[in-house]
Image (spheres, rainbow, N blue to C red):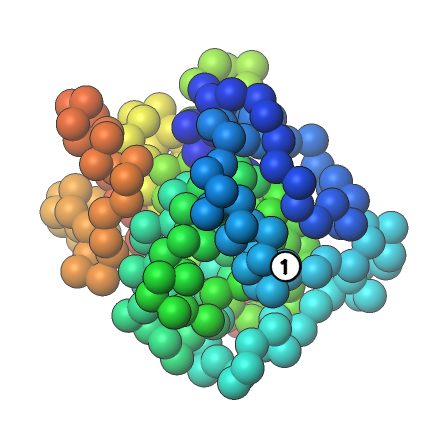
Amino acid sequence: MAGKVQGADQGTSLVTTDDSQPERRQIYGRRQGRKLRPGRQDLVDRLLPQLAIPLPPASQTASSRTIDPVALFEPPPKDLWLEIGFGGGEHLAWQAEHHPEVGFLAAEYFVNGIASLLRELDKRRLRNVRLYQGDGRDLLEALPEASISRVFILFPDPWRKTRHHKRRVVQRETLDRLAHVMRDGAELRLATDHRDYLIWMLAHCCAHPAFRWLARRPDDWRRRAGDWPASRYETKALESGRAPTYLRFRRRPREST
């Protein structure tokens, strides 16, 4: 989903990017914060078009909107992982560097976060990431069934006010679509530092027949797994005295759901 909390408390100036894809959902929060420095603007202008995931028009039928994500990469990856709302991209860049055999699909709306990720991809010479600038749920709708082996939704905007809960990315509709695109045995990782959203995530995911919570003891949700690096947002949460929670779910076999 577009944006972490930081996208909502920045400025309003926009960056010119590829706007050929029609808006598919109303996205809340601002698209950009501070004006990009020339180097980062150059990355957005030069590198983003090379890595962009083109989605078919929303007016097409569901079957014709499905893309072939493997074809986005050369050479073809052994696996496909997805991150929805990657913020500044620290987690995504780490995963891409440590798993060069995996193709990473990622969605983010906040331009400054996209520029930060592009800087890391360029600096580390990473070519196994493809980006969609927009709402991650639009990307989900274009992915084929049983194509994704791991999904990350880390520190999404909690939309604290009750009247805004319908804007939260973790909803039954999103989980239904995740269940469709995730392979049997695939892993869904969620993180939040907001207690109410934690309860919301657990209630929705544990009630969904396609997902099984993997926690067996308190440390399973209090500590990150060894292959789960910290992000900039997580560091700020800890410095502010907010304790993050880390949730892992397994996609159940289809014959059992």
> What SS does tag 1 mark?
helix
| Residue labelled with disc 1 | 49
Q: Image quarter for residue 92?
A: bottom left
The residue under the point 72% across, 58% down is: 55
Residue 186, horizontal then vertical, whole percent:
42, 67
Picture layout, residue 200 above or below residue 213 = above
Q: Quadrant of the N terminus?
A: top right
The residue under the point 86% across, 58% down is: 61
How many C-alpha atoms fall within 10 Å of the one at disc 1: few (<14), some, or many (≥20)? Answer: some
Look at the image and tell me whether residue 212 can be seen.
no
Q: Image quarter for residue 179?
A: bottom right
Amino acid at circle 1: Pro
Q: Can you name the residue that lies furthest to the front here?
A: 38
Residue 144, horizontal then vertical, whole percent:
65, 68
Picture layout, residue 49 above or below residue 80 = above
Pick the residue in front: 66 or 127: 127
Q: Is residue 42 left or right of residue 20?
A: left
Picture layout, residue 220 above or below residue 157 = below
The residue under the point 16% across, 42% down is: 222
Residue 50, horizontal then vertical, whole percent:
60, 65
Look at the image and tell me whether residue 234 can be seen.
yes
The residue under the point 19% across, 22% down is: 240
Q: Image quarter for residue 187?
A: bottom left
